[in-house]
Image (cartoon, rainbow, N blue to C red):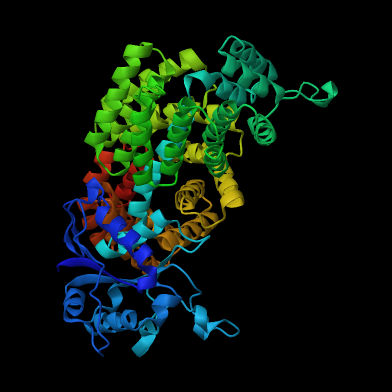
Amino acid sequence: MRYSAFISYNHRDRAIAAWLHKALETYVIPKRLRGRQSKIGVLGTKLPPIFQDREELAASSDLALSVREALEQAFSLIVICSPNGAKSRWVNEEIRVFTALGRRDRIQCLIVDGVPHASTTDGADSALESFPPALFENGGAEPLASDIRPGMDARWSAKLKLIAGIIGVNYDELRQREQARRTRRLAIVSGLLGVGFVFALGLAVFALVSRNEAVRQRDIARQKTITAERTVDFVKSLFQVSDPSEAKGAKITAREILDRGAVRINQSLNDEPSVKADLSTTLGEVYSGLGLFRRGDAIIRNSLLIKKVDPATRIRQEVAYAEAKARQGDYQQATVFFNRALKAAQGKDASRDELVPRILVGLGEARLAQDDLSGAEKFFSRALQIDVARLGNTHPDVARDLEVLGWNDALKGRFTQGRNRLERALAIRLRSQGNLHPMISDDLTALGSIAYLQRDSRSAENYWRRALTTDQKILGPEHPDVAATENNLARVLLERRAFKEAKPLLEHAVAMITREQGDALDELAYELDNLALVYRGLGDDARAENLFRRALTVARIHKHRNLGPILANLAEVVCSRGDHRAGFALLDESRKLMAENYPDDPWRVAWADVVRGRCLIASGDKRKAAAIVAASRRAISERWPDDSLYGSYLRALLRQLGER
């Protein structure tokens, strides 16, 4: 078909339609999906064209011929739902024409205003109805819908859901890729402070360790320029209390320092706008570095409202704002502000040469977000070249450049080179910033991930143990990053059957995520599945089955990539208690999802077949089980050693079959 989608909307919603049209047509399909057969054909770099604008229609009873032809040539229909669209004659007609073509199942909705089902809800104002009535004619069911009304889906999330529906992949495949980009940017931002305020970040973070370290940093800061001295005086005041007995030698948390600073900045420094703007920007970046992203971004955005700021400080503010836009997934706007800041930083009026590498890293991250790994590498390499020439080989800014280059290498499959670069970055940070800097944990986590991808589980475990210790010291035991690190470490432990050691890590991670982010967070699909495997390994099948079913519920809600493995794991427990029919049904679904979601991991499909072999033995069909296991054992053996979770399971099954 000529069009991948037809956007149906009322002219009053033209601005939203224009945004959606541009967002869909400029979306770069992730590299790993290109060449895959999809609902719209073999996937390339971009989606086929999106039809948006229709001709002005005459007051006739039929759609214009060109619009009807476009509908016939469109694979899917996206309806922009609002009270305007619900009342629109042409929106309803376009839905009817598309439905008549037998494509009702290819209709998706984007709710932008109003109240869905207001016309059929008692007491509701029917004038606020969002859905066009044609959607429900002739027994039509409610289509899949994304919702960008305030408080609902973010625009980037809604866009990915629509694209997933068009090409027929799991939303989670696209979301995880997008989230990886965002998470990587958030991890980097804490190390990107300007030279003049590096010590301010040190004061805030090292306050977690001791008051004395913060005072030492303050004393060093007194040797800086007049503006820096004034800033340090302000930071110094954040540590003072009216009653010396109030502190009683207790440690002060970074969050307490930041909150106190934010209040005081807002109430003072009005006669020194440049100092106020620069310090506000620094505090915003430190908030973000501690995982408080909304608070940090709000402070940075508000700092741009300060007037009479000198040009050099304004450049730094714009860089921080560009980074905030990137954290929100708006890479297009981030690129605009990065380019503007780059031009100003290299200008004669307010030269900020020291910010140029940081800006280049930001531009590279934006390219990385669009899967342009080669383009990203060029920006990262330029930043490294400038920093080495300016600062030498042992400066933290050089470590930052090596970190982004190392991760880019890993994404391109150059694991050894990426690992070497990250090891160099880690050594620089340990030597220059100590073992309690936030980026130490990020480097260790990245190194663990690369080692795991290289199937070096022992090294991955060592990296993640160090990362967990660092996270707990810097962030405290209840920070979300701690839960992620606990899950990573527990995974390698359970893979080598250290169930008792993995259990408390996973229980703490699940409890923390459930308490702070709810029991339906998509990431819980991993933690619950891993915890269930631990209980299965410890012989508590009832608890394991309960956890597998909780994981299954979360995975189905989010169409999670881990759905296939969860189904296979649950089937193994179900079969072990004698419900073979239910087990085989779960395995049928699991095997299909394994093939779709893990095309490069043949052991996944083999695992579903091995579990089927166990179920067949339990049901009395040993001959069929032997054939299935024989066809699957090689893929499992090549991936997992005999003493691992999966290798030992295979060996036990072969013994049941009388084989070696």
Q: Is residue 321 above or below residue 403?
A: below
Please indicate, yes or no, whether residue 61 appears anywhere in the rendered image. Answer: yes
Residue at image location 41% in from the left, 22% down from the top? 352
Where does residue 429 sit, x and y in percent of width and height? 45, 18
Quarter of the image where one finds residue 616: bottom left
Residue at image location 33% in from the left, 51% down from the top? 656
Residue at image location 47% in from the left, 13% down from the top? 431
Where does residue 58 sit, x and y in percent of width and height? 25, 84
Residue at image location 29% in from the left, 57% down from the top? 22
- Give the total number of marks visible in the rendering: 0
- In the image shown, does 415 or 381 lie closer to the viewer? 381
Please indicate, yes or no, whether residue 187 appears anywhere in the rendered image. Answer: no
- In the image shown, does 66 or 600 lie closer to the viewer? 66
Where does residue 294 sit, x and y in percent of width and height? 55, 44
Quarter of the image where one finds residue 333: top left
Q: Is residue 63 above or below residue 176?
A: below
- In the image shown, does 595 or 380 lie closer to the viewer? 380
Q: Is residue 225 left or right of residue 611?
A: right
Figure quadrant of the N terminus:
bottom left
Q: Is residue 69 left or right of residue 184?
A: left
